[in-house]
Image (cartoon, grey):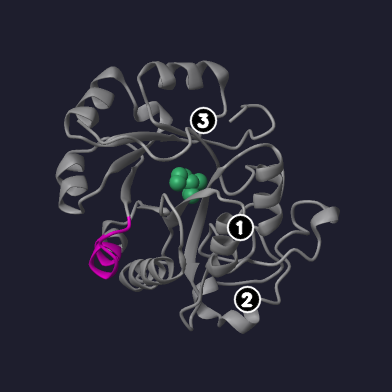
Amino acid sequence: MATAWPYPRWIAHRGAGRLAPENTLAAFALGHAHGYRMFECDVRLSADGRAFLLHDDSLERTTDGVGEALARNWAELARLDAGAWHSPRYAGERLPTLDAILAFCMHHRCALNVELKPAPGDAQRTGEVVAVEIARRWVGTPPPLLSSFAPEALAAAAEAAPQLPRGLLLERFADGWLESAQRLDCIAIVAEQRAWSAETAAAASAAGLHRLAYTVNDDAEAARLLGLGLDGLITDRVDHFRP
Ligand code: G3P
Ligand code: MG
């Protein structure tokens, strides 16, 4: 039997889904304005080891930069425009540091799900640096939930800050998922919504794991997942689902 789930049920994906430039402070502010009190975001490292928010390995889709983010130092990344790609009114929005996002969440008493999104080959460093920063900086309860598709990043986070809760991200329930979650001492499985069935939900629950789904943007799917007893739903549609 899992312990009580200390986080809100509804979680704003990348800050505010697609309504604002993903993984920016403007997105967090918009998600918050829509009543959301928990956020998911993607965190990785610059070449010189600064933790910041960015989903992709490369800069092109969501900034005016080019190439791999991991090849740049933070001083360069901090100058990029991370909002104009979305819409003119967000021009000038910057890539936020993890530190700025932690400060936002603590100030507004919001919960946070930090997805460790390491660049290829950078999983161990990412897990360690991010976990250490959160452990040093975060004040309040509940602490940020660290999640990742990269077991190596979660293992490094567990080593650096074992007290921070971890969730294993899954696109599907492949062989060995439970052993992985148990080896990493995870408290939750965060699975792609279609991967949750009565069987997988029961298996996770029987193992004492909390259950979350991403990215839930459809009413019928939300109702199905809540019917299965899931603890958390990560959504883009912060203007549609009332948290
Ligand atoms: O953390 C859940 C979800 O964000 C995982 O997929 O690609 O949106 O980061 P992605
Ligand atoms: Mg993510």
* Element type where label 1 sits in the image: helix
Where is residue 82? Give x, y as percent.
Answer: 70, 63
Q: Which residue is mark 3?
A: 216
Residue 155, given in percent of the width and then of the height, sits at 24, 62
Residue type pointed to by label 1: His
Q: Earlier in the sequence, mark 3 or mark 1?
A: 1
How many other residues sit within 10 Å of disc 1, few (<14), some (14-19) or many (≥20)? few
Q: Is residue 215 above or below residue 91?
A: above
- Is 151 magenta? The answer is no
Q: Which residues are magenta?
A: 155-164
Q: Is mark 3 within 8 Å of ligand 1?
A: no
Alpha-carbon distance for marks 2 and 3?
31 Å
Mark 2 Cα shell of 10 Å, populated few (<14), some (14-19), many (≥20): many
Task: Give the image quarter of residue 67.
Answer: bottom right
| Prevailing secondary structure class for the magenta stretch in the rendered image | helix
**Dot 2 amino acid type:** Leu
Q: Residue at x 48, y 84 (%)?
A: 48
**Regarding mark 3 in the picture, which secondary structure is present there?**
loop
Q: CA distance from mark 3 to mark 1?
A: 27 Å
Residues 157 and 214: in front is 157
Q: Residue at x 54, y 69 (%)?
A: 99
Find residue 96 and report its horizontal and vertical position in percent.
62, 66
Label placed on residue 34:
none
Q: Mark 1 to mark 2: distance in Å?
A: 25 Å
Foreground mark, 3 or 1, reads 1
> Disc 1 designates what residue?
107
Circle 1 or circle 2, nearest the eye: 1
Q: Which mark is residue 77?
A: 2
Residue contact between numbered discs 2 and 3, judged by CB atoms under 8 Å: no
Closer to the chain start, of discs 2 and 3, is 2
Residue 224 x %, y %? 43, 16
**Residue at horizontal 61 percent and vertical 59 percent from the top:** 104
